[in-house]
Amino acid sequence: MSQLDELYREVILDHYRNPRKRGSLKGPHVHAEGNNPSCGDEFALDVAVEDGLIIDAAMQGQGCSISQASGSMMMDAIVGKSIDEARDLTHKFKVMMTIVDGDSPVDPERPGAVLGDLEALQGVRRFPVRIKCADLAWTTLSEALDRATDGDR
Amino acid sequence: MSDLRSLRADFPILSREVNGHKLVYLDSAATTQKPVSVLDAMDRYYRNSNANVHRGAHTLSNEATEMYEGARVKVASFIGAQAAQTVFTRGTTTAINHIAYGWGLDHLGEGDRILVTIAEHHANLVPWQIIARHTGAELVYLELTDDYTVDTSDLEAVLDERVKVVAFSGMSNVTGALGPIDVLGKAARSVGALIVLDAAQLVPHSPVDVTEVDVDFMAFSAHKMLGPTGIGALWGKAERLEEMEPTEGGGEMINMVERQTSTWAPVPHKFEAGTPPIAEAVGFAAAVDYLTAVGMENIALHEQELTTYALERLSEIPDLKVYGPKDVTHRGGTVSFELADIHPHDIATILDQDGIAVRAGHHCARPLMKYLDVPATARASFYLYNVPEEVDLLVDSLMNARRIFGIA
Ligand SMILES: Cc1ncc(COP(=O)(O)O)c(C=O)c1O
């Protein structure tokens, strides 16, 4: 596969064209927004948290395939998880993408076993300027989760 | 096609490879590549004449001063101006900030209006927004016609004595549309407004003579016309520059400094506080020499031919939409476009794999993106060193982008 085909895996294009959980939440939720001013990617999300559990989430915004697919996959991945699990997932994702240091959580023998569809985003690492596109949703999520836990205190 | 092809050899960077392909540089609206003569001039300055200017009697300082002031004369005459009315700045952005702060703060007040167009670069919007906040003035926008040129049909509706400044670009860095210099100039004069021309994309691409266009201030950047980054010019009518306050204080810009107050050096030096970008001025002059030798008429013609060809070839690509005038006499060689549902950022990545450099994003013109109702655009921009084969490579690569995104 060429580097480009590696980058634009079918699953990524599918999430880009059919983002999961696009919209906004009606009930109580926290909201966070992020953007990359240099390229114009915008991402926002609503997260509904109950007893430390993410019971629902919805995303808004616009941007390139990588930023939107990353957000859409994130939506799939976090609903039903506890805040701690979502934070752990965020960390694993950032390590996989070489955004933060650490040993790769991905098992090359068993593709998809650890991070599911998100592992398809590994192709982005070859394109350093695009890593921040993949990161946007996760940074925005961290902000939302911080906000959700702030309210508890 | 007018043949400037042999000039390519003057630009060392054009022979490098990017991602295994020969570089196809289509991002000159962001910044241009530099010919050897510019690089050499700056190198020679540092090797032989480096010293601070206007400071002391030694030989090197004298040489550096002559080179710096000589550069001013060259840049001034390139736009038909006098050196005394040509201020070196850090670039277009700094030049417009000088005008906004130095002129705007003193001359604008509550209820006054600054007339701009929706196509402006942030450099010609944000300084005015800041001054508006300080003074109580407001920005009023002209919008665009169906052909992406500035719509002046409703000018009467927004034009009255409240308009104190009319600020607009000579050529849009997004749509490539030429600005209606004559119409807006006449309109501004009829209400006594100041005329500010953002010529960042105009001066590099066509002959401009300040004695032939009726504006009060004009700003442009060296790096968009084969020169180095870090320098540009602000030209102003003598009486306007006189009434404008300096926005930066320090060395070089003073006449006499007392404990509590100071007096300013004459224009243009009163706007050049601190050690100026001397090597950059030398490079700027070398760039102007280069452009003059090629001939601005020839460059304009070359770009018009290339743009005609590009628009024709791009129209062969299904689902491709150009955001800019179709009539090449209303535009320059900056072509913004959108391709199917492929985000511009993805287009830029795919093209880059073929060694093709284009810009993707909002091009420092977010209000325009909102107005066009697009998140961003991809932009290919041409200059004297581009050739039709590069347009062909662009088209091939865009077809590949369609394939990668699964568009038949
Ligand atoms: C139309 C226009 N105005 C202003 C600017 C700002 O120029 P600079 O960044 O050199 O100050 C640019 C460059 O991006 C431009 O294209």
Image (spheres, coloured by chain):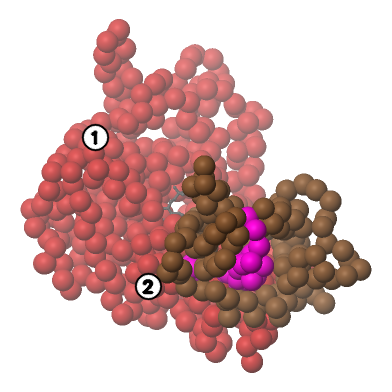
Q: Which mark is residue B244?
A: 1
Chain painted brown? A
- From what the image shows, is residue A100 above or below residue A89? above
Q: Position of residue B374 (x, y in %)?
A: 43, 72
Task: Judge from the rendering whether residue B388 lies leftward or rightward of residue B131; answer left or right.
Answer: right
Q: Is residue A73 visible?
A: yes
Any magenta on residue A64? yes
- From what the image shows, is residue B269 above or below residue A124? above
Mark 2 vs mark 1, foreground winner is: 2
> Callout 2 environment at 10 Å: few (<14), some (14 to 19), or many (20+)?
some
Q: Residue at x 35, y 59 (%)?
A: B120
* Location of residue B260 (image quadrant): top left
Residue farthest to the front?
Answer: A51
Give the chain of mark 2: B
Give the chain of mark 1: B
Number of numbered markers: 2
In the rendering, what colour is chain B? Answer: red
Query: Marks 1 and 2: in contact by CB < 8 Å?
Result: no
Who is closer to the viewer here, B350 or A23?
A23
Any magenta on residue A34? no
Q: Secondary structure at mark 1?
A: loop
Image quadrant in which the N terminus of chain B is located: bottom right
Q: Residue at x 52, y 32 (%)?
A: B278
Q: Position of residue B236 (x, y in %)?
A: 28, 43
Which amino acid type is marked by label 2? Leu
Residue ID for mark 2: B372
Who is closer to the viewer here, A6 or A28?
A28
Which amino acid type is marked by label 1? Met
Q: Residue at x 87, y 63 (%)?
A: A107
Point out the stretch of residues depicted in magenta. A60-83
Determine if the C-beta at disc 2 is less than 8 A from ligand 1.
no
